Amino acid sequence: MDEKNPIQAVHCKIFGIVQGVGFRYSVQAEARRLGLTGWVRNCSDGSVELYAEGSSVQLRHLVAWLHHGPPGAEVERVETKDAKPAGTFQRFSIT
C-alpha cells in the first residue's frame, strides 16, 4: 500500500467456512466501524469477496480482522491484493 496516497484500496477473497455464518454482515459492520467504503459478496465457489477503500491503517485493520472473522467462521486463508481506488463508493454495502 502506498503510504503517500490517503485513499487506498484492497481486493480480498476469503476462503473457509465463511458462508452461512453471518460473515458478510460482520464484514459490513467492521468496515463501517473502521470508516471504510466498498462492498462484500458471496462467491459461487463458497468464498467471500470484498473490495474496500480507505486509509492504509483502516485497511490493515480490516485485513487483520478478516483472518479470523466473526464467531462461527473458520477462515482457512485470505488472498489480498492492492487495488486502484475508484473513489465512487459512499458506504460499505453487501451486494
Image: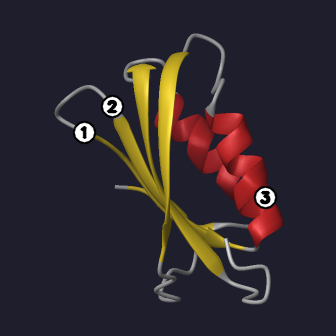
Position of the N terminus, as image quadrant, is bottom right
Q: Is residue 49 above or below residue 73?
A: below
Label 1 secondary element = loop
The Cα atoms of the two marked residues, 2 and 1, are separated by 5 Å
Discs 1, 3 touching: Cβ within 8 Å: no
Q: Earlier in the sequence, mark 2 or mark 3?
A: 3
Residue at the image point whose x is 63% and y is 27% from the top: 69
Discs 2, 3 touching: Cβ within 8 Å: no
Is mark 2 in CB contact (under 8 Å) with mark 1? yes
Q: Which mark is residue 14?
A: none
- Disc 3 marks a residue whose amino acid type is Leu
Q: Which residue occupies 71% across, 37% down?
A: 65
Residue indicated by mark 2: 47
Q: Would you call the spot at circle 3 few (<14 residues within 10 Å), some (14-19), or many (20 or more)?
A: some
Name the residue carrying label 1: 43
Is 73 placed left or right of 56 in the picture? Answer: left
Q: Residues within 10 Å of mark 1 (few under 14, many from 20)?
A: few
Residue at point 53% right, 20% down? Answer: 75
Specify how the rendered protein is coloured: secondary structure
Instruction: Give x and y (percent) for residue 47.
Output: 33, 31
Relative to 23, residue 83 above or below? below
Disc 2 and disc 3: Cα gap in Å?
23 Å
* Three-letter code, disc 1: Cys
Q: Is residue 57 above or below residue 94?
A: below
Q: Position of residue 91 (x, y in %)?
A: 58, 71
- Residue 44 located left or right of residue 66: left
Give residue 34's mark: 3
